Amino acid sequence: MVSGPSQYKTLRLSEAQRLAWLRLIRSENVGPATFRDLLNHAGSAESALELLPRLSRQGGKKSYRICSVEDADRELEAHHRSGARLVALGEAEYPQHLKHIDAPPPLLSVKGGPALSQPKTIAIVGARNASLSGRKLAGMFAHELGASGFVLASGLARGIDTATHEASLRTGTIAVFAGGIDVLYPPENNRLLAAMLENGGNAISEMPFGWKPRGRDFPRRNRLISGISLGVVVIEAAKKSGSLHTARYALEQNREIFAVPGSPLDPRSEGANDLIRQGATLVTSVADILEEFTGRVGQALPLQPRLLEHEADQPGALAEPGDDLRSKILSALGPTPLDMDEIIRFTGAETRAIHVILLELELAGRLERHRGNKISLLM
């Protein structure tokens, strides 16, 4: 990707800004995409916090919960006590490739050393109930990739994840949590995590401190595993496994997808074999992976300036959207996901005015976002 030098901005939040960012992302119905839209609309997190009650009322919600200063301070202090830190999108320590996924987390909880800043990161994922040969293969791949200068990423789950982290302790490894940075799952990997951190590896999470993971949190975690990586290697994945979710995110994020073939008689290999049939690169050795990256690793990708705090789009720059436009958008939306571009064409209104109304609906809990820039109305 070729871009002008002005795009290579590095953000450094003040403590007041970091507190405002934390309050905003922890407020009701604010996810990474909504956070981005609010920041772009208001110009700063502090200004966005002031707008939240009015925007949610316009969307039809009478009361709205904003994360308090006290709650945000407690979370910051909890990070400090546990040896963790909150890293903001655009700051130097934020994972280079994660900046460029759809709706990257505005804040990451981070524990550990320098591994996270290494752009040569590759993920290995696979079955929790992995076979002995599958674990051995994951360990061999991780060890050889580490020796070739790669940091290894995975989810610290049982099976393939554990084998990957164990084999890359000395060369750098990153565990991505589905819960809070202080909530280890599974708990028996506490010694492995301690060894990772002692050797300069990392644990990261986008979830609040103390958050216990639910089923829906693991796909969110999987998008981060692929997002921090140049590619994903799948070893022993069943047909409907979380590893295939990671591969699908990798495809959406324009990452390389590698799959190790397995026996057609083993259901643990069904998903990986399907990936190969769908076009994933078949690999039987680390040399196959390294060949794909020859001459393409290490290029710094530019951060989109619009994702940083700025002064361009102050709230007063746009007149309040009218009720007629609100009614038109509500009539167009329904339970079936609709592409944003269709809404823009249908209304013929200014794009930013449409985004404000969609923000109102989302903050009121009436709008759902889907992959591929699609939205639907919660009925």
Image (tube, rainbow, N blue to C red):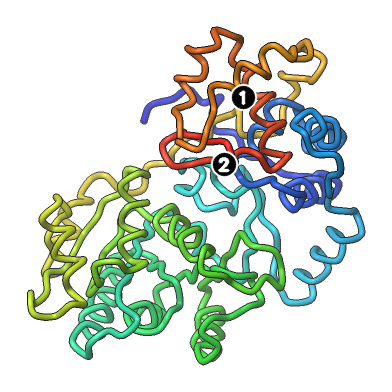
Q: Is residue 264 left or right of residue 13?
A: left
Q: Is residue 27 left or right of residue 366?
A: right
Q: From mark 1 to mark 2, how far is it between C-alphas?
A: 13 Å
State the residue position of label 1. 330
Q: Is residue 41 left or right of residue 227?
A: right
| Residue in front for this viewpoint, 150 or 36 | 36
| Residue in front for this viewpoint, 80 or 282 | 282
Residue density around tag 1, few if under 14, some if 14–19, many if 20 or more, within 10 Å = some
**What is the secondary structure assignment of the residue under circle 1?**
helix
- Amino acid carrying label 1: it is Leu
State the residue position of label 2. 368
- Residue visible at 22% across and 90% down in the picture: 132
Q: Is residue 323 left or right of residue 191?
A: right
Q: Is residue 265 above or below residue 302?
A: below
- Amino acid carrying label 2: it is Glu
Q: Position of residue 45 (x, y in %)?
A: 78, 38
- Residue visible at 18% across and 87% down in the picture: 133
| Residue in front for this viewpoint, 177 or 122 | 177
Q: Position of residue 234 (x, y in %)?
A: 25, 66
